[in-house]
Amino acid sequence: MRPALLNPLFAQVTSLSGIGPKQEKLLRYLLGRDDTPRLVDLLLHLPTSVIDRRAQPKIRDAVPGTVVTLKVTIDRHRPAPPRNRRAPFLVYASDETGDLVLTYFRNPPGMVEKLLPVGATRYVSGTLQMYDGTPQIVHPDRVVDEAGFAKLSGIDPVYPLTEGLALGALKRAIALALQKLPDLPEWISAEVMRRCGFPTMAEALHRVHQPLELTDVLPDGPFWSRLAFDELLAGQLALALIRAQLRRPAGNRHDGDGHLRKRVIDALPYALTMSQRQALAAIAEDLRQPVRMLRLLQGDVGSGKTVVALLAAAAVIEAGKQAALMAPTEILARQHVKTIAPLAEAAGLRVAILTGREKGRERRDILAQLEQGEIDLLVGTHALIQDDVAFKALALAIVDEQHRFGVRERLALTGKGEAVDVLVLSATPIPRTLVLTYFGDMDVSELREKPAGRQPIDTRAVPASRLSEVMDAVGRALSAGALVYWICPLVDESEAEGTGHLTNATERFESLQKRFGDRVGLVHGQMKGAEKDRVMAQFAAHEIGLLVATTVVEVGVDVPAATIMVIENAERFGLAQLHQLRGRIGRGSEASTCLLLYHEPLGEMSKARLKVIRETTDGFRIAEEDLKLRGEGDVLGVRQSGLPGYRIARSDVHAQLIAQARDEALHIMKENPKLGGPRGAALRCLLYLYERDEAIPFLSAG
Ligand code: ADP
Ligand code: MG
């Protein structure tokens, strides 16, 4: 149970005045949350820089390219001509030394008139530019009157924002959240506090959000560092707690005599690759050991992880036990079953599927068979970890696409058997340095070779202005019998708010359907599972040739005959995601083509990303380039720069702190592994604040 002390911080942001449904949605997006953000999420959203508004020159002395605050009189308005929405609304202002133009694009009607009435005195603040010899400020980030100016702080933090969310609104919300901060106990040891010169968490939060000095928000300064250490300590402590739990001697050995594995291998229409065989040998060795297996099987998309997973399952089934395979989406779970079913049948393995869709009678039957040991391998989604799912003898938990699951889900599955061995499948090639921070202490097998007979993928970047040519080409390919994916970043318009000009799948589906008729299908994450499957099946069966989709097809979907993929707004996708998406083609014996449609102008980062993805299909190389391009931040699809799963700590600035947090966590595990007493209570608060509390239920079980 979360300590009551923390409740104010876990209140939803909508409880703050000024945060309505619209802001809530934008904050969700900004803070990368699936649910309504809480005050703690706001407080841990740190500024990236500060603006010094203490400089208040006259217009004549203001330096172009710098942020200035100017006291001006509003002289006249020049609204955009009625028929030209693109033209700006101009406000002419002046002080005794010169003129200034304030420029607003696409402002809501009446907004500027109200903010800057003619004749009034205003303080305006923003980046000064010269335009046609006249100083101007485009969209000033502050406009206040005398009274407002008296309240304005001279040093103003700047936060990462999302379109549609005003800096002022975010700052007001954070200020309100700061007022709700309870008196927190100290969880860092006195010795570390002294050695590192840390302030308290409360002081750190106040100083980064309401800086008194320009240096207060620097990542290597004491305030940010304190918060980074907290976050790292929470992460390291949670991993240590889980590790202590999982690494206990199992006593059980789960290896069979190999007869089922042999039957599966005999039924394969291909030979296993060398790295598949090596991974299987390592798994078999793990299963023989009296300590639990905790192994990560990394392999690029299409490298053949599923068959390795099946053979691992066969090994424990030979020993009379059961296995479970959990996938993050229903499409993926069904895909696995499709791949596995014929092989399982040939080997005499009993496989069943359990997702949110198996209900009522059907579900009850599956659960009963499972409990009686009449099912050997159960494949499914989150549905597998529901409370009433009980195995007769679960010995192996296989978790696919792990980084989409929290540690909580992984543990929930392993809790359904005695000393369950764990095999994690990941299609994101994670550089070794990151494996430890993210997964903890795991053994790693890599599938580096591609199965034989794969054709290369021809990848090209095409500006969106050539969309009609692309459509023509797709039309020709369709007529020639090709299967084509068409990927869009959004589902529909309702999502588009605050995200700029992104193409939505629903609209694109309609325009393609107009042109190609019933050869076009649509899948996206908001559709019902059965509906999604039906469309995917139609595509696989070639009843439709063109599948418009969102990133739901990103993971695991396997239609080997598909040879063309168009990705819209390719500039908006991360490298790892582009690689995952593209991995849906080039899986068969035919040559494939991937077209990356982008909107101009391209930023430097987008340009570099598209270049990498054009040049190589090697997932490990892409992961390395990704790491170089943006630091370790987003290799796992995590926001901002920093460590995966961490939002404050950064590998470049806080490398020292990682080691110290690790030491501190190990020290705590030695001295106080059950987190008892006042220090233990404080540490539990820490785990909750940074959402590492999944480790807490295991304290008592220890
Ligand atoms: P992923 O690693 O992306 O999960 P899959 O397990 O889905 O890859 O395998 C991709 C495809 O490659 C499947 O159609 C599978 O049958 C096939 N495959 C797996 N191993 C081999 C192999 N050694 N030789 C040829 N094809 C293979
Ligand atoms: Mg797979």
Image (spheres, helix red, strand yellow):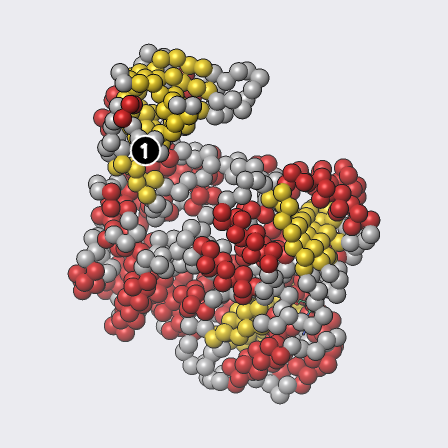
Q: Residue at x 24, y 46 (%)?
A: 215
Q: Name the spot of residue 565 as percent of width and height, x first.
A: 68, 52
Please tell me whether mark 1 sits on a helix, a strand or a loop: strand
Q: For residue 188, what is the image quadrant? A: bottom left
Image quadrant in which the N terminus is located: bottom left
Front-most of residues 11 and 131: 131
Image quadrant in which the C terminus is located: bottom left
Front-most of residues 210 and 316: 210
> Would you say residue 597 is visible in this rendering?
yes
Residue 680 vs residue 528: left or right? Answer: left
Residue 376 vs residue 646: left or right? Answer: right
Front-most of residues 344 and 122: 122
| Vertical relation: 594 (above or below) 666 | above
Q: Residue at x 73, y 51 (%)?
A: 484
| Vertical relation: 429 (above or below) 629 | below
Count up the numbered dots. 1
Q: For residue 622, what is the image quadrant? A: bottom right
Q: Residue at x 51, y 81 (%)?
A: 286
Q: Name the spot of residue 89 as percent of width and height, x first.
A: 46, 20
Q: For residue 665, what is the image quadrant? A: bottom left
Q: Quadrant of ligand 1?
A: bottom right
Residue 251 vs residue 451: left or right? Answer: left
Front-most of residues 423 and 138: 138
| Vertical relation: 313 (above or below) 438 | below
Q: Residue at x 60, y 51 (%)?
A: 551
Classed neighbour count for the residue bearing mark 1: other residues with Cα under 10 Å, few (<14), some (14–19), many (≥20): many
Q: Name the spot of residue 613 as percent of width and height, x first.
A: 58, 56
Residue 463 vs residue 341: left or right? Answer: left
Inspect the image, locate mark 1, and give the three-letter code of the amino acid beneath it: Val
> Would you say residue 180 is visible in this rendering?
no
Residue bearing mark 1: 67
Queried on whether the Cβ of the residue with tag 1 lies below 8 angstroms from ligand 1, the answer reads: no
